[in-house]
Amino acid sequence: MLLQDIWYLIHSLMPLCDSARCACASRMFLRSWRCHPKLILTEETLGLTQKESQKVDIARDFISRVDHILKNHSGTGMKILKFVIRDCYNVNTCHLNSWLQKAITQGIEEVSLFLPRKSSKDCNFPCSILLDGRGNSIRYLHLTYCAFRPTVGFDCLRSLTKLHLYQVCITGDELGCLISDCFALEELDLCVCRELICLKIPFWLERLSCLSVCDCNALQVIESTAPNLSTFDFYGEPVQLVLGESSKVKNLKVDFSSEPNFLSYAITNLPSIVPHLETLTVSSTCERVSTPMVPDKFLHVKHLNIYLGGDDDGAVTPTYDYLSLASFLDACPVLERFILSVNQGGMQHDSVFGDASSHLRQIPVCKHGGLKKVQINGFCSAKSIVELTCHILKNATSLEGLTLDCIFGAEAVSDPVRCSARKSGKCMSKSSRMVLEAHRALSVVKRYIVHRIPSTVKLNVGEPCIRCHAIDVKLL
């Protein structure tokens, strides 16, 4: 490599502000600047953060500096382009299109466009700038708050491997036109795309391995025949999932946000929809009935994560029977790790302290021979959660570790102090009810759990923070 090439490489690795300063001081760096491979145009990189309170000035300076940079850039050598445009900048569509026309050139690999929220209805991404070979090299495309309207024959993104769309107006047919020839596509992320009704992933996208769909609330059907899709994350209104028995999805995170009793749906329907799962994460914000026992099995699931409860108002009804979660353990015959997270905020339940002589229920023997690690975040004094814990201790014959975290969302259990004061000055705010429940849970561990721990099992208990979550013991 020539010495000049080495200096050009060093220049390309500098932050944008430093690169510009060097270009002002050196003819060699000026030549390099005109072919700079990365233009990350944000308030910070343009040195405008000190004018936060002067919105008119900062908007004018942002437009002026971007104009100047793009005017002096030759257009060659561009690899990465990123715009972050705030609401207060008042950048009109014509101005933006002019910038993109100048910056998106042949050879560019990454394009990220973070537009103002208010532009989502009236800003159309100019698809034409991707034609004439300028889109052929793009590997990563991230668009926000705009409309994207590709038409039939839009085949200029053949190198695209990652596509992220956030609050982008695009229909299912238009998305089909966009990805139909993206044979290299590996990752597709769709968030708050409200015009999507039907999402179809064709079988010829053989490299697609990751699909994420979040809050596309008009969506009704997700149908995928992509042969190597292995990771699928979904959050939003209930949809029909059509993946087929040949589906190779191994990692699934799913939360039907407004679906009551979603755990019942998951254990009843998912074994046939995604038969080859190895990791399953399900979230529910409204469980009103016990989770049923089912004949179908998750034959390959080794890691199971269940999240219950949405916010500090709580969402799991007082009558929900945590012991019924044993049906999930039964449905996963090769399960090795189980994590249950329960948001205790506002929770009401039948406490195990309600009747000191009450008998802890047991269910028919069902051995969980492969289960090695269990963690319950938000362990509480609910009688049925104590019963679930005792059931696991009795029937998980290969159990190596049990972690019971008594306060949801605290610092790591391994931290002996468990206080985030080192980072923020105090622990994450918790209601007095949650703190009181955490101390009750700690008493439950000492009274009902400790003496049941086999000698081969390591017990880890996450206690309330001794600095921020102290209470008067008379309240227990």
Image: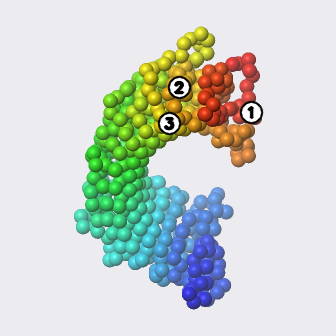
Among numbered discs 1 and 2, the one appearing first in the sequence:
2
On the rendered structure, is 66 left or right of 365? Answer: right
On the rendered structure, is 299 left or right of 20? Answer: left
Image height check: is 87 above or below 153?
A: above
Q: CA distance from mark 3 to mark 2?
A: 12 Å
**Could you say which is closer to the camera, residue 143 or residue 252?**
252
Name the element at disc 2: helix
Quadrant location of the N terminus in the rendered image: bottom right
**Residue 80 visible at all:** yes
The structure residue drawn at horizontal position 37% and vertical position 26%, both measured from the top left corner, is 293
The structure residue drawn at horizontal position 38% and vertical position 30%, both measured from the top left corner, is 264
Label ID, residue 466: 1
Name the element at disc 3: loop
Q: CA distance from mark 1 to mark 2?
A: 32 Å
- Asked if the residue under mark 2 is in contact with the one under mark 3, i.e. CB atoms within 8 Å, the reply is no
Among numbered discs 3 and 2, the one appearing first in the sequence:
3
**Residue 286 visible at all:** no
Residue 276 image point, x, y percent: 35, 45
The structure residue drawn at horizontal position 70% and vertical position 39%, both measured from the top left corner, is 418
Among numbered discs 3 and 1, the one appearing first in the sequence:
3
The structure residue drawn at horizontal position 61% and vertical position 24%, both measured from the top left corner, is 452
Query: Circle 3 is placed at which residue position?
Result: 371
- Specify the amino acid type for callout 2: Lys
Query: Circle 2 is placed at which residue position?
Result: 394
Residue 286 image point, x, y percent: 44, 29
- Specify the amino acid type for callout 1: Ile
**Could you say which is closer to the camera, residue 369 or residue 363?**
369
Which of the two discs, 3 and 1, sits closer to the camera? 3
- Specify the amino acid type for callout 3: Leu
- Asked if the residue under mark 1 is in contact with the one under mark 3, i.e. CB atoms within 8 Å, the reply is no
Q: CA distance from mark 3 to mark 1?
A: 32 Å
Residue 319 image point, x, y percent: 47, 19
